[in-house]
Image (cartoon, rainbow, N blue to C red):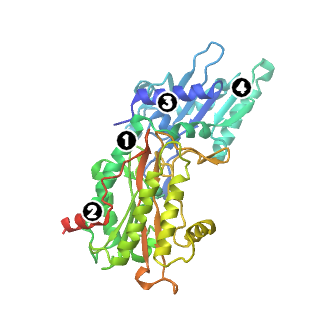
Amino acid sequence: MRPDIATHRARRARLLKTMGEGVLILATAPEAIRNRDAHYPYRFDSHFYYLTGFPEPEAVLVLIGARAGKRARQILFCREKNLEREIWDGHRHGPKAARTAFGFDAAYPIGELDKRLPTLLENQPRVCYPFGADAAWDARVMAWINTVRGRARAGVGAPGAITDAHALIDEMRLIKDPHELDLMQHAADISAAGHRAALRVCRPGLGEWQIEAELLRAFRAGGCQAPAYTPIVAGGANACVLHYVSNDRVLADGDLLLIDAGGEYHGYAADITRTFPVNGRFSAAQKDVHEIVLAAQDAAIAATRPGNAWNAPHEAALRVLTQGMIDLKLLAGELDGLLEKEAYKRFYMHRTGHWLGLDVHDAGDYKVAGAWRPLQPGQCLTVEPGFYIRRADDVPPALWDIGIRIEDDVVVTEDGCRVLTEAAPKSVAAIEEAMRDGR
Ligand code: GLY
Ligand code: MN
Ligand code: MN
């Protein structure tokens, strides 16, 4: 399950083929200070990791495209071995070991980057790097190019074009390979176990933070390195706050609890939302809304098939949700007219999904040449309709503060899609049964 050399080397070879002539430069993420001298847990850059599997900070990938009879080259710059730092902070591969362990043609100390890059850029037609993403890197790359320009009188050519490295890699990341799908299934399974643990322990009087602790425990115990994003553990009215993350309120009898949480496994995210009653039994009104959201999700999942446009699942969910709003007397009028006017936005204001992978909101365009992109086998996305009803005079009180979202992760297959997160209970019956078992 760990990053494997052949897979990452093959990805780099594929990128080199797409890129053609030129030099690609891609740095991993910097370490980040949390406060004073305490760091956030380190997280590599997703693009860099996709191509290298190399987990250390202070590393740069350089790919040199094949040209004029010269073979393409894959180069890593990384930290040198350093006994003192390794005693304090842990293992460093060092260039020599990293070259073989990660399948590079060459590896050099990161401290040699400024010395070596101008030479590597000589007589190359273009530089491919994530320009505009980081001002310091922009300046550094321009300084290398200017150094090469300074050698013009010696007959050295400098790159004349700069292209965006992320755009090239985004397209690759959009279609997951079998290695990635294995990791994503693992992330999904561990995360589903976290949701089952939350169902088992939930009861009135517990704090949202205590349910969060249960999720985090399950993610770590299952092997995830971190949560893929800050968990949302939102009881009662908090569920109607879409990005609620304070998780500091006590859960009340009769309220619903919305949990949006997933773990990250070797870089890959799961993103699951379930909504269930704190006391283990849905009220009639809670059940009505839950059934509508579940039916919307079923319709969206049925619309997640190759050839359908990216927006097809969203449109399918909107029809079911808007009809549900009419049935619950939250909206008055005729379905197509209400869809046209986007009247549903008062109760459903977000979209029905996003790409999922190394980033929870993963790389890849949603439109191509102005049109929604067709779904293709190997794409991973979430399907996450919701229904959020705030207190208001024109809303029946039984529906007040009901916020429900149901979110699964799916991979598009040859003839439809496969749900990766099935192991998290989601029907009213399955949820009530799982909660009964926990008591
Ligand atoms: N958890 C982030 C999202 O659902 O998009
Ligand atoms: Mn999501
Ligand atoms: Mn989510």
Disc 3 residue type (three-letter): Arg
Q: Is residue 240 left or right of residue 285?
A: right
Say which element carries label 4.
loop
* Sequence-wise first label, 3 or 4: 3
Q: Which image quadrant is residue 232 in?
A: bottom left
User: Disc 1, ligand 2: is the CB inside 8 Å?
Assistant: no
Q: Identify the residue at horizontal 19%, vertical 65% (top origin).
A: 437
Q: Are marks 3 and 1 in contact (CB under 8 Å)?
A: no
**Residue sitting nearer the eye, 213 or 120:** 213
The numbered dot on residue 371 is none
Local packing at callout 4 (Cα closer than 10 Å; few below 14, some 14-19, many 20+) is some
The residue tagged 4 is 125
The residue to which callout 1 is attached is 183
Q: Residue at x 35, y 72 (%)?
A: 287
The quadrant the C terminus occupies is: bottom left
Q: Quadrant of residue 153?
A: top right
Q: Is residue 307 left or right of residue 403?
A: right
Q: What is the crowding at mark 2: few (fewer than 14 residues within 10 Å), some, or many (at least 20)?
A: few
Which badge, 3 or 2, comes first in the chain's sequence?
Answer: 3
Q: Disc 2 marks which amino acid?
A: Ala
Per the image, the residue denoted by label 2 is: 430
Quickly name the residue at label 3: 11
Mark 1 burial class by Cα count in 10 Å: few <14, some 14-19, many 20+? many
Mark 4: amino acid:
Pro
